Structure formats: structure tokens, C-alpha cells
Amino acid sequence: MEVMETIALATPPVVSGAIPLLGHLTEFGRDRTGLIDRGYKEHGCVFTVKLGPQNVAVLLGPEHHRTFFMETDKTLNIATPYKFLRATFGEVFFMAGHEEYLRQRPFLTQAFRREKMAYYIEIMNQRVQVWLDALGDAGEFDVSATMGWLTQDIAGHALMGERFMAEAGPEFWELYADVGRGMDPILPQYLPLPKFRRRDRARARMADILRPIIDERRANPAAYNDFLQDFVNSRYNDSGEPIEDEVLLNLMLGLMFAGHETTAGQAAWNVILLLQHLDFLTLVQEEIERLVPAGQAVDGRALHALTHLGYAVTETERLRPSADMLLRDVDVDMAIGGYRIPAGWKVQVSAEVAHRLPDWFESPDAYDPLRFAPQRAEDKADRFALIGFGGGGHKCMGMNFANNEIAVITALLLQQFDLELLTRDPGIVRGVGANKPEPAIVRYRRKPQATPVAQGEAVGCPAHGVAQVS
Ligand code: HEM
């Protein structure tokens, strides 16, 4: 943040098109990226969008991203803009407020520790292979919908384990859907609306399902290796007490939400973008054939070696970030880019627009994964240039998990099938949670050498090495 007297400064210029009372609210709902793009063209990297009575300062580019992320938990508040999520996920993560977040953070960092990644990669391989085995020799699927349930299935297995998924899976997912449908950023969360009632009933039923499972986990602390077991085994640093059942449920729900729809969107786009760019697809195919021929699992070592696939995954983050905008509340007047941002305003960063700034990315609208190869390394010029996973102290804890998952899905799919994109140019569906592609049909044909593995059986998984694709 610039250190200067803020009082003499003007607030950032307002983007054209604001109408009385509503400001840009309607346009924001219809096409928020178009609105922010126009703001950039009119005013540069700092400008104001008016959402009804709420002023939002939009900040674009690494310098301002740095302020946004580094001032979070100081002058900028991350908890209040997301408070609508509390009724759904309870008091966990940054929604809980900073002090409680700091109490819970060790559980999360523990569950995401490096040594666990090999196990999660093994699960990813198993679940993707179950899907691929069920595809038969030829057919079509909608990659957008498929990635939705596949990433949900992977997250469920990694979070709660095989047995839980087998016993409680289908009912749990129906309840989870009811919880998700109850998310509403506008309406007061405790109104007696049917969707809020269903959300609360679903949460209560999920707690009933989880309770005996948690009891069994507490009695057998060494029997499982998933997130749930890590949380069950954890204790608060200050009190030495185990995590309460209610908080455990909230952590599981919160991680499902944070982890699956975001990953689904980028996983689907990763496949689509490759199928739209056949030259680069050929490079990735060649790499897969050489490093993970048919019958081999995509373990950590292979993921590390699949460099072109890694560049593609990062290019997908750049061009099609699932989390296209992040918000903070301004608690204290601040100066940014020569403007004053008063307390009470919101600030917003927009990955989708910032990732196309020509000062940071060469030919920014082009799909060009080699921009991330060591000779060019456009992502390394400034650590706040690429913000698809956020930045600073709240940077996504699941980033490696997600990137590895997207790479495993893409690698196994291309290892075993020839693909053709029938929906040539799917648009972007922007939701409350995460972005995803419109329905996009892919035609597939099993490659002659790819023998299906029996349903439910794990592909061989040496499970060594820790992959970090990006
Ligand atoms: C492509 C997939 C993903 C994307 C695009 C994504 C994006 C993000 C972003 C942008 C943030 C920062 C939010 C902010 O600063 O306001 C974040 C935080 C977080 N994400 Fe992810 N995420 C993804 C996958 C995952 C997965 C798979 C998990 C867990 C299994 C996960 C868990 C989290 C958690 C726990 C936080 C909060 C970190 C903190 O406050 O310290 N995410 N994610």
C-alpha cells in the first residue's frame, strides 16, 4: 500500500454505464468480465464499479494484486465479504474470522502436507481409471458435466475414504447438493425460505451420518489415511482438545466446496483447450506416450516429468480461471494507484481480466502454454501476475492437489483414448461458486493398445515422488 495522506486523493474513476440506484448491478450479473474489461480500457488498472449503493474498487495487475493479498487480514477483511457462506459451511477457514482461522490453520496445513500427496495421487488414478473403464470402446460424453461428478468423486474419496463413499455416498451427495443450492450471496441467510430450510435439514442429516463414522475413526486412529482421519487425529494447539464434531463436518463440507467445483471447471477447460489446439495436443500426446505408456499409472514422478502437460494446466488457469474474482472489505482508508479507497468500500481482483494484461503476458489472448517453459517463464516475472489460486497468506491450500488432479485426469484420458471435440467453442458459465464450460461434447475412441482395467480395480501405482505440476 502506498504510504501517503489519503484525504487529498480522489476515489477511482467510475466505469461508464452506471444507472441511478442500480449502478452496474445488472451488467455485473450479466457479464462481469465484460464490465471489468471495459473499466480497464477506459481507466487502466484501478477503477470503480457500483453495485447498487456499494462501491467496489477493481484492482488489476501484479502491483495492485500484491496490495490486495498482502493487506488481507490487515486493512482488508476477507471474512466479511464471504459471510453469506457461514450459514452453509459454518465457522471454518477464513469465514470464521482471523483468530479462529489461525486456530484451525494447523489442521489444514497438516492435511495438505507434502507426504500425503502421493496417496492422493493414487486415489486420483484409481477413480479416473474406474471412469475410463466404464466408457467402453467408443462414444461421446459431456466433458463439463463429467468433470463435475468425477472431481466430486475424487474429492469424496480423498476427504472421507473409500468405505464412507461406498456406504454413505449417494445420500451424502444428495444432501450436499441441497446444501449447495442453499447458497445465496444476496438474501439474509435465516429467512424462512424452502431452500434455506432444505439446506439446514441437509446439514443436520449429514451430521447424523458423520457422527458414528467419526466415533469409529476416533477409536481406530491408524486405520485410515484420508483428510477426515487427519482432522480426527488433530488437536488444537492452545487447548490440546480434539476438533469438535460440528467443526469436522464444516471442514469436510468447506473443503468439498473449495475443492471440487473449481477443479471441475479447470479440468474440463484443460481438456477442451487441448482439443482446440491440436499442435500443442500433439506435444502432450507424445510426452504421455513416452513417459506413461498404456497400463502405467500417472504417479508423482511422471507428473513431474510431464512438463508440457504442466504448462497446459497453467495456461488453463490463466485463460479460464475458475475463481474469476475475489473480494475484500476495506476496513481502513487506503491509497492505491494514486487514488483513495475509503473504508466501507470493497476491493476486487479479477483473474480473468488481469491474466490478459499485455504488459505481463505476450499475445495474451493466444493459447500458448510454452509461455511457461523456462526460457520464457512468464509466470515467474512477478509472483502476483498469475492469481488463479489467489496469493499471500490465504493462497489456495489445494493448489497442488488440484493441478495434480487435472493433470492425472488429462494424462489418463489421452493415454487411453483418441478424442475429438464436437462442441467446437463452448462458452463460459459463471456461477456463485466457480466457472465452468457450457456443455461440451467430446467423441472418444479407445486406443488399440489400451486394455481396460477391471472396474473398481486400482491401476498399478508406485506412489512415490511428490508432484507439483505448476
Ligand atoms: C482449480 C481448482 C482450484 C481453484 C481455482 C482454487 C482457487 C482458490 C482461490 C482463488 C483461493 C483464495 C481465495 C481468496 O483469497 O479469497 C483458494 C483458497 C482455498 N482453497 Fe482453493 N482452489 C482450487 C482447488 C482447491 C482444492 C482441490 C482444495 C482442497 C481440497 C482447495 C482448498 C482451498 C482452501 C482450504 C483455501 C483457503 C486457504 C486459506 O484461507 O488459507 N482449493 N482457492
Image (tube, helix red, strand yellow):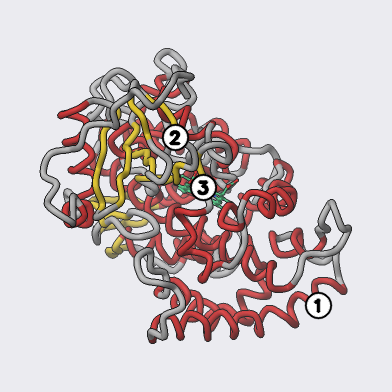
Q: In which quarter of the image is residue 42?
A: top left
x, y (%) of residue 26? 17, 57
**Front in this rendered view, residue 1 or 35:** 1
Q: What secondary structure is marked by label 2?
A: loop
Dot 3 beta carbon under 8 Å from ligand 1: yes
Q: Which amino acid does label 2 sit on?
A: Asp
Q: Which residue position is annotated with label 3?
A: 78
- Judged by depth in the image, the label closer to the viewer, 1 or 2, is 2
**Front in this rendered view, residue 104 or 301:** 104
Q: Which residue position is annotated with label 2?
A: 333
Task: Determine whether 229 is above or below 355 in the image.
Answer: below
Residue at x 44%, y 34% (from the top left corner): 333
Q: What secondary structure is marked by label 1?
A: helix
Q: What secondary structure is marked by label 3?
A: loop
Q: Quadrant of residue 279?
A: top left
Using a 10 Å C-alpha cutoff, classify the residue at mark 3 as few (fewer than 14 neighbours), some (14 to 19) or many (20 or more).
many
Task: Determine whether 142 is above or below 354 in the image.
Answer: below
The answer to whether residue 298 shows anywhere in this view is: no
Q: What residue type is labelled 3?
A: Ile
**Front in this rendered view, residue 320 or 225:** 320
Residue at x 76%, y 75% (from the top left corner): 214
The mark that comes first in sequence, 1 or 3, is 3
Q: Which amino acid does label 1 sit on?
A: Glu
Q: Which mark is residue 216?
A: 1
Spatial CA span between label 1 and label 3: 36 Å
x, y (%) of residue 351? 35, 38
